[in-house]
Amino acid sequence: MLAVTAHDHPPAPPPDAPVAVLANPTAGRGRHRDVLPRLLDRLGTADRPVRLLGATTPEQAEAACRTAVADGAAAVLTVGGDGTVHRAVQAVAGTVVGFGPVPAGTGNDFAADTGFPADPLAAIEVIVAALRAGRSRPVDLARMTGADGTVRWYGAVLAAGFDAVVNERANRMRWPRGPRRYDLAIVAELARLRPRRYTLRLDGEPQEVDAVLVAVGNTASYGGGMRICPDADPTDGLLDVVVGGRFDRRTLMRVKPHIYRGSHVRHPLVRSYRARTVELAAEGITTYADGERSLPLPVTVTAVPAALRLLR
């Protein structure tokens, strides 16, 4: 098991180090435009300078967070959903820099599963109180390594089955815009649904499975509250792996609603595992981590205990 220790960390930021804020103005379809001004106002009580990060693309957002950490930020806060969290995590993983997610997106699974209030204004109060008290709590992250050595971190869930395939198709579509594009992608992929052969290696123990759904969770949920890995605990140093086997279209659609409650794991075609390191391979799959397009299979995913310092 790979742990993040004090020896791995740079010195703690000084008391006057700034707090960097990454805000996604389009998160949650713009429902929470008032959140950023409220956050900036409340940060004024934490006695630290505030640096608002500018970015117009996800790549720029990630780069801005990395620069802020390299420049000595005491904390990075995000205003947005899981995609915004994902970009910031690439910068703060494995450091002593505090992290606070203000849940203002369509999907806020990481914030919810790590104990932050669903109401963004209430989450701000939790984060600001932690900053003022100098308090943070460690949680695990998942570190993913691709075949070419590329490393990515994620906080919630890695999708590597039907949901990843649907996301990939939806991202290739130019019409229609909005949620209907995703709905059409589901219909298209259901029409060609077939189990794929996966090679799994769990803490070195190999097995091959034919599956439609494969998820590797640090936390329980993805997709805005779907509890795909319902027993995942981001403080146990382990990854939860949920595999949905040879589902046909009708069975898959019957099982899907159960994922919101986590009861799908009782279906006879579903298997659950727990491991520190997961090696996963299959043909033609691009994974999605925290809802963001990530690495193609094969990948190796490792649970890294205490890799993130949450401001709560």
Image: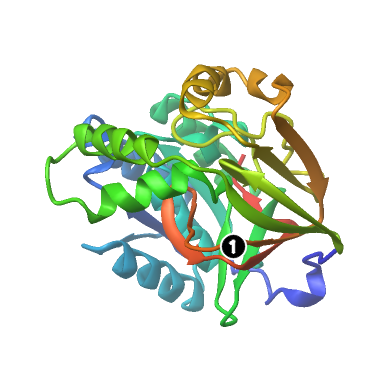
Which residue is rendered at x = 59% and y = 61% of the image?
282
Closest to the observer, 289 or 283 = 283
Would you name the residue on which mark 1 appears? 97
Which residue is most to the bottom?
A: 148
Q: Is residue 301 visible?
A: yes
**Amino acid bearing label 1:** Val
> Quadrant location of residue 65?
bottom left
Q: Is residue 147 above or below residue 247?
A: below
Expressed as whole percent of the image width and height from the top left, the position of residue 309 reads 65, 53
Quick one: quadrant of the C terminus? top right
Q: Residue at x 18, y 37 (%)?
A: 178
Q: Is residue 25 above or below residue 283?
A: above
Q: Quadrant of the N terminus?
A: bottom right
Count neighbours of disc 1 (C-alpha within 10 A) and say few if under 14, some if 14 to 19, many if 20 or more: many
The tally of labels here is: 1
Q: What residue lies at 81% left-to-right and 64% top-to-bottom?
A: 3
Does the rendering let one see residue 23? no
Describe the element under mark 1 as helix, strand or loop: loop
Residue 31, how many percent across, how many down?
23, 29
Q: Position of residue 260 (x, y in %)?
A: 54, 21
Image vertical order of residue 263 relative to residue 273, above or below: above
Q: Quadrant of residue 2?
A: bottom right
Q: How is the image coloured?
A: rainbow
Residue 90 in the image: x percent, y percent? 51, 65
Near-viewer residue (45 or 145)? 145
Foreground of the two, 138 or 16: 138
In-image side of 185 versus 284 (left or right)? left
